[in-house]
Image: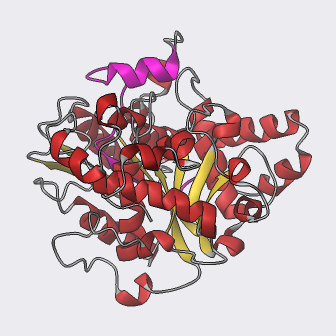
Amino acid sequence: MFTKNNTFDQIMHTSPVRRAIGNLFPACWLERIPKEHYGYTMSRIEKEDRMDWGAPFISDSFLECANILMDTVRNQRFGFVPLWKGGHPSAAFDPADPPDKRIPDADANCAEGVWLFTANPETDSIAFAHLPAASSVPPYPSAAVSAQKREQTSARPAVILCPGGGYEMLSAYSEGIQLAQRMERDGGYKAFILHYRITPNHYPLPQMDLALAIMHIRAYADWYRIDPDRVLIVGASAGGHLCASEALLQEDLKKEVLAKLRGSNDAQASAVFADCSARPDGIGLLYPVISFLSEYHEGSCQNLIGQTDSLREVLSVERHITNAYPPTYAFSNADDDAVPVSNTIRLKEALAQAGVTHLCEVFASGGHGVGLGYDCSCGAWSEHMLAFFDRLFS
């Protein structure tokens, strides 16, 4: 296990950390460490280097991700399950395969790089819940879900987590790893983190990745020990748009996915997913991008639609919601200067008009990209979301 006594160089030169750490810890955060500090211990780096937002370098988070990778290599406690490759997901945890086959490069931004990161159901199905990190533990008693539900070992509800990043990068730690810990430990879920395609891959490719992920875990629900009728998708920022738009367009996306699989001569995979719905049973949205028409996030829009301006209206979710839309939780912060809070407000209005069960909240402060946001006014949002879906899934 790596500790703060290890140098950055020592950690990064341990296989497979250098090529794979970006799957769990954003590469842009590593850029906060100057090259001349690579020989420093992580303890010293924490004291001398700062994050973009002024905080000390988050060495604990970096070490956690590096240690998760090593646990994946040595113990197959976690695994990267490829989605477009086909085959049974157990192959992703096969110790006979060398690590370079089981663990993808962080820069694999193509169909072969689309995967679900999850705990190995054959060793520790909810290993996220058992990670020793304390940063995802709420500073208040978490009572939204009963102890009985939190401790069940089979037929758990599933949650697919879609990190944000403007369809340009994926914030897989604060909007992936930490949320997975919270959802498994305090919510009784089995968590999956989706690594979906980003720019220059345009719509519908990221949405197809999520649709396939939903169908995949339903197809293998028994092996994953989840309830296929309780599948939640949770996304932050652009990942929120991914979730909201997939739920809107899921029928067409399923057709696209099956056609793609048939076109790749993967008839077996196509048959496996043919009877699986791509509709989520619930949606959770953190400071989401919703609209591409007004007060929208320009980067997310351009990265997803490219030069196809006609998609602005198609992918403005608030314009198309009907009473068939899944139950939805969403929150934003009033002082968000990246994605205007009006996105969540307009979503709330559209859900109410369509008669869709929902809870949409606006908190006073916290800005954008806060993840669990325990130190902000939105610090109870995850408790509210867990309670909202617990009532619906009961």
Which one is in front, 293 or 211? 211
**Residue shown at the point (64%, 44%) measured from the top left:** 104
Vertical arrangement, residue 273 with respect to residue 266, above or below: below
Image quadrant in which you'd find residue 385 = bottom left
Q: What stretch is highlighted in magenta?
A: 277-306
Which one is in front, 174 or 148? 174
| Residue 1, horizontal then vertical, whole percent | 45, 65
**Residue shown at the point (30%, 57%) measured from the top left:** 60
| Residue 148, horizontal then vertical, whole percent | 41, 90
Which one is in front, 154 or 334? 154
Q: Is residue 369 left or right of residue 24?
A: left
Render colour scheme: secondary structure
**Residue shown at the point (74%, 55%) measured from the top left:** 98
Q: In this view, does 92 lie to the left or right of 380?
A: right
**Residue shown at the point (34%, 85%) measured from the top left:** 146
| Residue 310, horizontal then vertical, whole percent | 51, 14
